[in-house]
Amino acid sequence: MSTLEVSFVTADRTVWTGKASRVIVPAIDGSMGILPQMQPTLAILDRGIVRIIAEDGDVMQRDVVGGFVSVDHDIVTIGVDEAVQVDANRA
């Protein structure tokens, strides 16, 4: 099974890095799901929740306001100014 190599960073730290089965981001024009073998994409992020579903099924969620996501050859890079932990009951 294919996986995504994900790097999720803020201006001052790495939030999450590793292999994921899928990623969901709040693109400026709507929620965007990213799966392995997706066409190369560059999108601007809006306010919302970034969800990374790790290869083992664990889910990492952070609230973001703006940034970008880049997808190329199953490598996903998410860059934001700030990423805040999401309350499990909120998501």
Image (cartoon, rainbow, N blue to C red):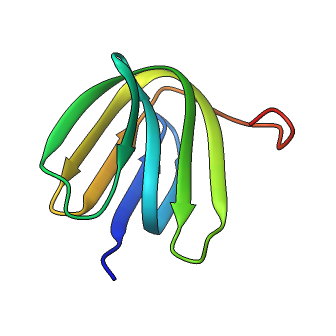
Name the one closer to the observer, 33 or 18. 33
Q: Residue at x 83, y 37 (%)?
A: 87
Q: Which one is nearer the viewer's eye here, 46 or 10?
A: 46
- Drawn side of residue 40 relative to residue 78, left or right: left
Residue 40 drawn above or below residue 64: below
Q: Position of residue 75 (x, y in %)?
A: 25, 60
Q: Quadrant of residue 89?
A: top right
Q: Residue at x 35, y 72 (%)?
A: 3
Q: Which part of the image, by quadrant, shows the C terminus?
A: top right
Tell me the quadrant of the picture where the N terminus can be found.
bottom left
Q: Residue furthest bottom?
A: 1
Q: Is residue 16 rendered to the left or right of residue 3?
A: right
Taking 72 as reference, is 84 above or below it?
above
Residue that appears at 46% across and 43% down: 24
Q: Please say if 31 is above or below 34.
A: above
Asked if 58 appears above or below 12 in the picture, the reply is below
In percent of width and height, residue 47 lies at 53, 17
Place of residue 90 in the rendered image (x, y in percent of width and height, measured from the top left)? 81, 32
